[in-house]
Amino acid sequence: MGLNDKEVLELRKKYGSNEITRKKSNTFFKILLESLSDPIIKILLIALSIKIVFLFKNFDWYETLGIVIAIFLASFISSISEYGSNKAFERLFEESSKLSTKVYRNGKLTTISSKEIVINDLLQISSGDKICADGIIKEGSLQVDESFITGESKEVNKKIGDKVYSGSTIYKGSAKIKVTEIGDKTFMGSISSGVQEKTCESPLKTRLRVLAKSISKLGYIGAFLASFAYLFMQIVVKNNFNLELIIETIKNIPLMLNYLFYVLTLTVTIIIVAVPEGLPMMITLVLSSNMKKMLKDNVLVRKLVGIETSGSLNVLLCDKTGTLTMGKLNVKYIIAKNGKCFQNKNELKCYEKYYNILTKSLYLNNESVFDNDKIIGGNTTDRAIKRFTGNMQINDEIINKKLFSSEDKYSMVQTKDYYFYKGACEVLLEKCQKYLSLSGNEEKFISKSFIQSMVNSYTSKGYRVLVNAYGKNKDDLVFINIIVIADTLRPEAKPSLDLIKNAGIKTIMITGDAKETAVSIGKELGLYNDKSIALTHNELSVLTDEQIINLYPNLCIIARALPQDKSRLVSILQSYKLVVGMTGDGVNDALALKKSDVGFALGSGSEVAKDASDIVILDNNISSICKAILYGRTIFKSIRKFIIYQLTVNVCALILSIIGVLLGISTPITIIQMLWLNMIMDTFAGLAFSYEPPLKEYLNEKPKTKDEVILNKYMFNQIIVNGTYCAIICLLFLKLPIIRHFIRNSEGDKFLYTAYFALFIFMGICNSFASRTHRLNIFAHILQNKVFLIINAFIFFAQIYIIYYGGNLFRTYGLTFKELLFCLILSLTVFPIDYLRKYILKKRNIKIGV
């Protein structure tokens, strides 16, 4: 029976192994090259090219090298993060793909890896197994879980000649299956190939592209103004506006060439200053550091953009089965004849006689069994009832039994004393002439209408409802109770959905279940109320996209959903500029997961769903989606905080470059000092902001729109006010005679320029504190980001070290304590100015914050 080794080798050579071909992840080198397409990196590359052209004129190796290092660090760190996350997911995929199966080879039944299955293999499948290839049943019968395809938590009966699919789980039965398709040719494989396409651009990437254009315009305008001012000063002002002298200067070719070379160098320098070279690195640091934090919370981020996109979600399309529910049936209620409901068997124990008969009936009339505390065999209903009763010591011998069939609609077991029945109400209730009271007495029915109405009520809500009965005579039964069975909600589902709702995100539950079932579950979850709308696939399919959008504010549930419904909803909502999230675990979710802005797949879901997702929830906990949303918002805010800090320093430097020329101030900061400011300080500051804590208050805010500019009015206000103030302080520091009373006179103003360098760095540190919070208290939540404190302390003491030991390299000379204290006090004036700015905005009821 089965194939022999020679046939296996030939078939494997002809058809390949039983593996789904996955799109190869990019090599590190390719990812590195692709990272250079970042808009801000492009600006740096242009600046680098201009610098290289004029490098030999000014021999400005330090600044040119600085740009190279900035590009390298931003690209290298980004590439390492993406490459590492890809490898982490590949390891997860390989681990989850390690399945084994029983197969007949060389006339014997043996266990092999699922990857070794070939066409025409004969598999032996039984309860609890997972089918690893598509095939045809040759012998036996099965009850199969195909919810990963259909979205319905119902078993599907399979008989000889029926097709079974890779990824299905066996509820009950055993069978021999002849393999017909493996790997990419399976149903799961065909779906997988359809979802391995390029992911849409994240909202943050869209905003950054706009920001890069704005920054470049700012740089060009600033460069033009500074260059014009410099040429105007040299050609017109220095010649006292004398036309003859002006013309004579213009005709002086060597002199004009020197002016032009200086102007070109000044232009490139201003463009470099205007571009926040720490920004791409900051984004990468924040995304990658939070990805590691989330991995510790059992959340695997496959794509870095998945974190930040989750913070911008407007709507979450949430698959019911396996996401909001456990994906398995449980007994919800045991209802006695008088209508009293019991939710667990402990509540029944006070009715001893009633309890004994009820549990014996449920336990014996059941095809599932306990195996080392694990319930195996039986159908989903049997296993649900067994979970309710637990493992009991009932030793009554079963003399005869009748299995449940769709024709008779009941199951029965016979013991020495009783017949125990379980089945449809319409079949069993008419056989019951008596009922068992809670006191354990058999009493005659006066009316059965109350029981029938209860059954109808629960059935209309989509519950699975059965009647439990017993009797000494099979034609004269005693009604025991109603059994109400439902798919169990995850305990964390409702509070998580409440948090998501509070965050301004709309949730639409999508399920393959009947509308009544879906509405009932929706009410339990708090998703559905009197104004809510629930649609089935048939109702949805006849609506136009515009009609669906009109219903969107009240649309909460899609029942009897098909895969195309999910994909269509994603497309419609995205077309109206909504950021769409999708959760799911089955093959039927894969296309919608891929198409959505951010897809959340459950760790226990199919490999196809994981492959299509942005984030894999390893512990199947929907509360992790809340964490992802919180982290996403924290990341966006952290990036905005860093942009405030970065552009405040850049605006200050830009004003100094333009106004300084008009005031006749030559560049007071050397190239090496600029590298310290632009590279070391920006890099450390980026790292400091990347550890900003995720505050729960962020979930009280509405999500950002997809096309919202990254620089809002509050940010612009802080950048201009604080940047201008710092520039004014710096200009006054260099030009006011009173400053000479605090700083020693020296040849070449070496102490003045050292103090100026210290002032600039100290003001940068103060601005970082002002940028990290919109509160009047700049130290709010500061202890939750100890990295921020450590890094700023390091920058401060490193600057002190440079002042005293930088020497000729940094062009610094030791300051006295009085001089150093003066610079520090002057830099601290940033705090009252920023406090006043925030206070005025608050008093005017202007929205503040990032």
Image (spheres, rainbow, N blue to C red):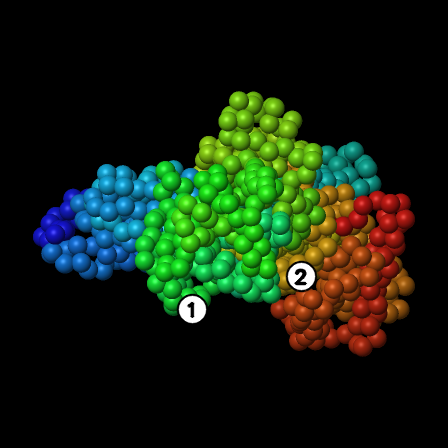
Give the amino acid at mark 2: Pro
The residue that disc 2 covers is 693
Residue 669 falls in image quadrant = bottom right
Give neighbour class at mark 1: few <14, some 14-19, many 20+ (Cα, 10 Å).
Answer: few
Residue 594 x %, y %: 47, 41
Q: Residue at x 49, y 60 (%)?
A: 357
Viewer-closest of 656 and 845: 845
> Is residue 234 found left or right of 322 in the rendered image?
right
Residue 65 x %, y %: 54, 57
**Label 1 to label 2, Cα distance in Å?**
53 Å
**Residue 134 visible in rendering:** no
Residue 548 falls in image quadrant = top right
Residue 531 x %, y %: 69, 34
What label does residue 393 carry, if any?
A: 1
Give the amino acid at mark 1: Gln
Residue 43 x %, y %: 57, 44
Q: Disc 1 on helix, strand or loop?
A: loop
